[in-house]
Amino acid sequence: MRQSRLLSILITAFLFLSAGCTAKSDSGKNITIWHWMTDREPAFRELAKRYEAKSGIKVNFELYAPSDAYSQKVRAAAQGSNLPDIFGILGEKRDFASFIKGGFILDLTPYMLEDKAKWKNSFFAKALAVDEFSAGNSYGVAPGIYGVPIDIMTIEMVYNKSLFKQLGLNPNQPPQTFERLLEIGRKLKAANLQGLVSGWGEIWMIDCLANNYAFNIMGKDKVIATIKGEVPYTDPGWVKVLSLFKDMQESGLLASGVVTMVNKTAEQLFANEKAVFAFNGSWCVNVYKGMNPRLEYGAFLPPKASNKYPMAIWGGAGSSFMASSRSKNKEEAIKFLRWLTEAPQQAYLAESTNNLPANKDSLNWIPPVMSDFAKAMDNATHPNVWGVSEFSPVIEALDKGIQSIIIGEKTPEQVAREVQRVKERELAKKR
Amino acid sequence: MKIKASLENYLFVLPAVTIFAIFYIIPFISVFQLSFYDWDGILPTKIFIGLSNFKEIIADKIWWQSLWQSGYITLIALTFQNAIAFLLAWACDREIRMKHFYRVIFFIPPVLSEVVVGLVWQWILNGNYGILNHWLAYFGFTNLTHNWLSDPNTALTTVAIVHCWKGFGWGFLLFLAGLQTIPRELYEAARVDGANAWNSFKNVTIPLMIPVVVLVGILTILGTMQVFVLIYTMTGGGPGYHTEVPVLRILASMRGSSRFGYACAQGITFGVILCMVSFAQYLINKKAKA
């Protein structure tokens, strides 16, 4: 009796251990992909099935959410040398660069350039640029393409057409100038309506709008020069950028509580027609559709505050996949990525997830509001394509400073001085 | 024989010691080691920078502001939260109706997820559609309606009060357990000696409850200084830096800035501060007992 019990324990232990050992197959016919995109999981699984039917290779999409947890998991896996065949990276360009310099990511340039660069040319150039490192980049990464964009995104403003009608405004004419935007803000205040909502409690979205206006007021070169430390944040151009937030607040354009608002709350408010404007990314099409399918809204570029330079918005690859340089299934992984980014698969992804496809040839099917977002790609830029990155403490000081301006605690000049102090401190550390 | 017996004993504690070493001691040593390095959490190479991270912490005004703010929340928790917990425990210890029901009700907030509590309170306190402002306006206190979490004058106190609401149940439970250990005969003897309710409370309850009060105090300090999830979900540390707390700063260094070395140094500094606070409280307690 005792012996049989011992035997059963040993068998259970053996099965348990062997199950653990075989979780990661080395057969070469399995590809493992880690991602964080909860909304795309069913579509990915369906595509995996189709690929297996076509090629006989099993693709395991493993979802790790939320994105914070995913981000930490990928870093930990890099340290433990257990990255999967394909994975995505969340974070800034400098994090991406560290993964490359650490030898974790495969250079895809030779594959992209095969067949007269057929694969490379199938993407929107601005989407691919996010995954590209140009010659002489400040990160010290060898020039090349290190990722495959799966979809694209742009971040701009959206407005509620029904509330526009209610205010006596033309629902097909969003504001084209900053002055007009402020005028509408004053109207909203008088009508006791909430104006602009956005996830400005999450910081990076404030950074995004501030950079949009910095490009519009000072031009790209001056913004880049600021990041390089050649132009101070106390420059009148930056003070003007910061003053725009003060103007927005004073006009009544900003919804109350916007400084601590998370984007999910902002999305709920806009979808439930409790706010006239939102500043959000193209992913919102899917979100709003889920929250209120009857919502009538349109997208538009943030209205220009200056005519000197064009308005730029953040855009490019929404999410990308990278191939592990240490994978035993490199070739299979690349074949799959190539297949995944072909027009039919991209169209399927766009149709089922309402995300803009990264493949230029698959834009035939998209709803009108998505095409508004797609058109904005012409104005798109992104910190990941600038070749230089601002220090994180400086970004934080700028964004927190803007929050302080909005709550009336500090003036734009004060914030500009504080940000410059942080910049100088970081530059001194670097020297 | 003796050696065999002691080896056997060691064998029994070995699994626990191994698990403790793997999950506590080794990570602690790694954190301590990393605090002397500049590392982004990705690259295999780490740059040794000596005490630079600690020097930077000394000059980091936002870090000290966050520490002060968590101290403020702790002060409110120590006084307001624990006073309420004590009073409710005292009330439930007496012969009141439905006392078992109250015990369950008071212990509901601590068992709820902090994320859920944060989000629900964010909704209650919302300046636009929050239920608190709605009721204030309904009862004619329109001048009190407020954007509680976005106003720098109220944000920190508001999150402190929500933290107290979430945490008073633990204190309540410990105080109640403490009160129930006081022999009833002491109260009867006091009553025979002519003591009224206040005298019994002052001369019997309070002196016998001091060890529990000290214990709850230490737990409140350690728990509140490390408050994080609630604030993260309610304000994210904003507006500006007005609700930043040390753990949020550590997270910002690690995740926002990819400065793992600096984040580890912040963690070590914070740990040392907490140890010092606990030790001070231990000394005070020892002195009080003497």
Image (cartoon, rainbow, N blue to C red):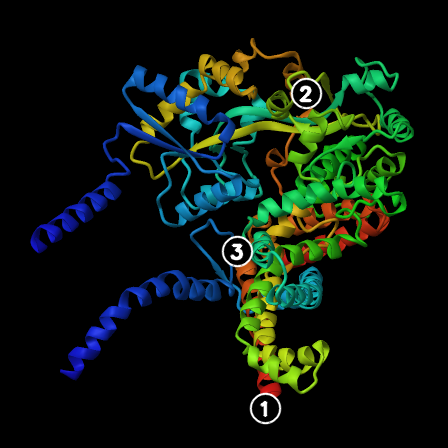
Distance Cα–Cα, label 3 vs label 2: 37 Å
* Label 2 packing within 10 angstroms: few (<14), some (14-19), many (20+): many
Distance Cα–Cα, label 1 vs label 3: 45 Å
* Screen quadrant of the C terminus of chain B: bottom right
Q: Chain of mark 1?
A: B
* Screen quadrant of the N terminus of chain B: bottom left
* Label 1 packing within 10 angstroms: few (<14), some (14-19), many (20+): few
Quadrant in the rendering for residue A261: top right
Please give the name of the residue rendered at 70% of the width and 83% of the height, measured from the top-left corner.
B195
What's under tag 3, amino acid-wise? Phe
Give the labeled residue for mark 1. B290
Q: Nearer the viewer, residue B223 or B186?
A: B186
Task: Give residue B109's position: percent from left, percent from top.
Answer: 59, 52
Give the labeled residue for mark 2. A376
What's under tag 1, amino acid-wise? Ala
What's under tag 2, amino acid-wise? Ala
Please give the name of the residue rendered at 61% of the width and 58% of the height, measured from the top-left corner.
B167
- The answer to whether dots 1 and 3 both sit on one chain is yes
Is residue B166 visible to us here? Answer: yes
Q: Earlier in the sequence, mark 1 or mark 3?
A: 3
Distance Cα–Cα, label 2 vs label 1: 74 Å
Q: Secondary structure at mark 2?
A: helix
Q: Nearer the viewer, residue A345 or B287?
A: B287
Give the labeled residue for mark 3. B260
Q: Is residue A92 above or below residue B217?
A: above
